[in-house]
Image: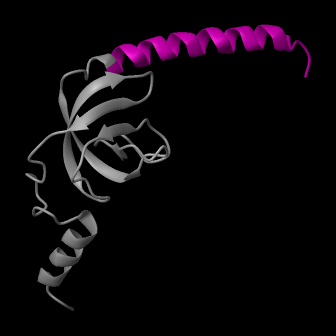
Protein backbone atom coordinates (compact mmCIF):
# COMPACT_ATOMS: atom_id res chain seq x y z
CA UNK A 1 0.00 0.00 0.00
CA UNK A 2 1.33 3.42 -0.92
CA UNK A 3 1.80 6.28 1.52
CA UNK A 4 2.19 4.19 4.70
CA UNK A 5 3.16 5.91 7.90
CA UNK A 6 6.76 4.95 8.78
CA UNK A 7 7.12 2.28 11.50
CA UNK A 8 8.96 4.64 13.85
CA UNK A 9 6.09 7.12 13.77
CA UNK A 10 3.55 4.32 14.28
CA UNK A 11 5.44 3.11 17.34
CA UNK A 12 5.74 6.64 18.75
CA UNK A 13 2.00 7.22 18.35
CA UNK A 14 1.23 3.86 19.94
CA UNK A 15 3.53 4.59 22.90
CA UNK A 16 1.97 8.01 23.49
CA UNK A 17 -1.57 6.58 23.29
CA UNK A 18 -0.73 3.78 25.75
CA UNK A 19 0.90 6.19 28.20
CA UNK A 20 -2.19 8.38 28.15
CA UNK A 21 -4.49 5.37 28.50
CA UNK A 22 -2.53 4.04 31.48
CA UNK A 23 -2.72 7.44 33.18
CA UNK A 24 -6.48 7.59 32.70
CA UNK A 25 -6.88 3.99 33.90
CA UNK A 26 -4.67 4.55 36.97
CA UNK A 27 -6.71 7.60 37.97
CA UNK A 28 -9.91 5.59 37.67
CA UNK A 29 -8.49 2.73 39.72
CA UNK A 30 -7.26 5.16 42.42
CA UNK A 31 -10.90 6.17 42.98
CA UNK A 32 -11.47 2.70 44.52
CA UNK A 33 -8.96 3.25 47.36
CA UNK A 34 -10.60 2.79 50.76
CA UNK A 35 -13.83 1.47 49.25
CA UNK A 36 -15.28 -2.01 49.59
CA UNK A 37 -15.97 -4.14 46.53
CA UNK A 38 -17.68 -7.51 46.21
CA UNK A 39 -15.24 -10.00 44.67
CA UNK A 40 -15.67 -13.48 43.22
CA UNK A 41 -12.59 -15.51 44.21
CA UNK A 42 -11.14 -17.23 41.13
CA UNK A 43 -8.16 -18.95 42.75
CA UNK A 44 -4.93 -18.61 44.67
CA UNK A 45 -2.42 -15.94 43.68
CA UNK A 46 0.49 -17.11 41.54
CA UNK A 47 2.94 -16.35 44.34
CA UNK A 48 0.90 -18.41 46.80
CA UNK A 49 0.33 -15.38 49.00
CA UNK A 50 -3.37 -14.53 48.85
CA UNK A 51 -6.05 -14.85 46.23
CA UNK A 52 -7.06 -13.56 42.81
CA UNK A 53 -10.61 -12.52 42.11
CA UNK A 54 -12.73 -10.15 40.08
CA UNK A 55 -15.42 -7.63 40.76
CA UNK A 56 -18.74 -7.24 38.97
CA UNK A 57 -16.99 -4.92 36.51
CA UNK A 58 -14.21 -7.37 35.53
CA UNK A 59 -14.59 -9.91 32.74
CA UNK A 60 -12.37 -12.97 33.07
CA UNK A 61 -9.20 -12.91 30.96
CA UNK A 62 -10.02 -9.42 29.66
CA UNK A 63 -10.16 -6.92 32.51
CA UNK A 64 -7.97 -6.41 35.53
CA UNK A 65 -7.91 -8.51 38.65
CA UNK A 66 -8.43 -7.98 42.33
CA UNK A 67 -5.56 -9.34 44.43
CA UNK A 68 -6.82 -10.26 47.89
CA UNK A 69 -4.99 -10.86 51.15
CA UNK A 70 -6.86 -12.66 53.90
CA UNK A 71 -7.83 -15.94 55.52
CA UNK A 72 -11.01 -17.96 55.37
CA UNK A 73 -11.33 -17.42 51.62
CA UNK A 74 -12.46 -20.17 49.24
CA UNK A 75 -12.45 -20.42 45.46
CA UNK A 76 -15.89 -19.64 44.06
CA UNK A 77 -16.88 -17.58 47.08
CA UNK A 78 -18.10 -13.98 46.99
CA UNK A 79 -16.28 -11.85 49.54
CA UNK A 80 -16.11 -8.20 50.50
CA UNK A 81 -12.67 -6.65 49.93
CA UNK A 82 -11.43 -3.27 51.15
CA UNK A 83 -9.22 -1.77 48.43
CA UNK A 84 -5.81 -0.72 49.75
CA UNK A 85 -3.83 -0.18 46.53
CA UNK A 86 -4.34 0.13 42.79
CA UNK A 87 -2.26 -0.16 39.64
CA UNK A 88 -3.15 0.83 36.09
CA UNK A 89 -5.31 -2.26 35.69
CA UNK A 90 -5.60 -4.14 39.00
CA UNK A 91 -6.86 -3.56 42.52
CA UNK A 92 -5.25 -4.86 45.71
CA UNK A 93 -7.17 -5.30 48.92
CA UNK A 94 -7.84 -7.12 52.15
CA UNK A 95 -10.71 -9.50 52.76
CA UNK A 96 -13.03 -8.02 55.35
CA UNK A 97 -13.81 -9.97 58.49
CA UNK A 98 -17.29 -11.37 58.59
CA UNK A 99 -17.49 -12.17 54.90
CA UNK A 100 -20.19 -14.47 53.54
CA UNK A 101 -22.89 -11.91 54.24
CA UNK A 102 -24.23 -12.06 50.69
CA UNK A 103 -26.60 -14.44 48.97
CA UNK A 104 -24.44 -17.51 49.62
CA UNK A 105 -24.71 -19.24 52.98
CA UNK A 106 -21.67 -19.01 55.28
CA UNK A 107 -19.01 -21.55 54.34
CA UNK A 108 -20.74 -22.42 51.06
CA UNK A 109 -18.80 -21.72 47.88
CA UNK A 110 -20.43 -20.80 44.58
CA UNK A 111 -20.44 -24.36 43.22
CA UNK A 112 -22.14 -25.70 46.33
CA UNK A 113 -24.63 -22.84 46.31
CA UNK A 114 -25.57 -23.54 42.69
CA UNK A 115 -26.00 -27.25 43.43
CA UNK A 116 -28.16 -26.37 46.43
CA UNK A 117 -30.33 -24.08 44.31
CA UNK A 118 -30.58 -26.68 41.52
CA UNK A 119 -31.96 -29.18 44.03
CA UNK A 120 -34.76 -26.72 44.84
CA UNK A 121 -35.78 -26.26 41.18
CA UNK A 122 -38.71 -28.25 39.84
CA UNK A 123 -37.71 -31.16 37.63
CA UNK A 124 -39.10 -31.50 34.12
**Span highlighted in magenta in the image:** 1-29
Which residue shows up at 19% across the image and 22% down it? 34
Give the quadrant of residue 49. top left
Quarter in which the C terminus is drawn: bottom left
Does 97 appear above or below 23? below
Does 98 appear above or below 87? below
Which residue shows up at 24% across the image and 57% down it? 77
Percent across and percent down for residue 38 are 21, 42
Which residue shows up at 17% across the image and 66% down it? 108
Percent across and percent down for residue 107 are 15, 64
Does 57 sit left or right of 87 as displayed? left
Does 40 sit left or right of 9 as displayed? left
Does 83 sit left or right of 88 as displayed? left
Percent across and percent down for residue 47 are 48, 43
Front residue of 50 and 115: 50
Secondary structure, magenta segment, majority class? helix
Residue 106 belongs to magenta span: no
Percent across and percent down for residue 65 are 40, 38
Front residue of 18 and 73: 73
Give the quadrant of residue 6. top right
Does 62 appear above or below 85? below
Quarter in which the N terminus is drawn: top right
Residue 38 can be seen, yes or no: yes
Which residue shows up at 32% across the image and 23% down it? 85
Amino acid sequence: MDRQVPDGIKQDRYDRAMTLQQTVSREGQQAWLGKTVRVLVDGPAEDGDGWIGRSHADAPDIDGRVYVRGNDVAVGEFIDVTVTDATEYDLVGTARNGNNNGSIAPGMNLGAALEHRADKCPKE
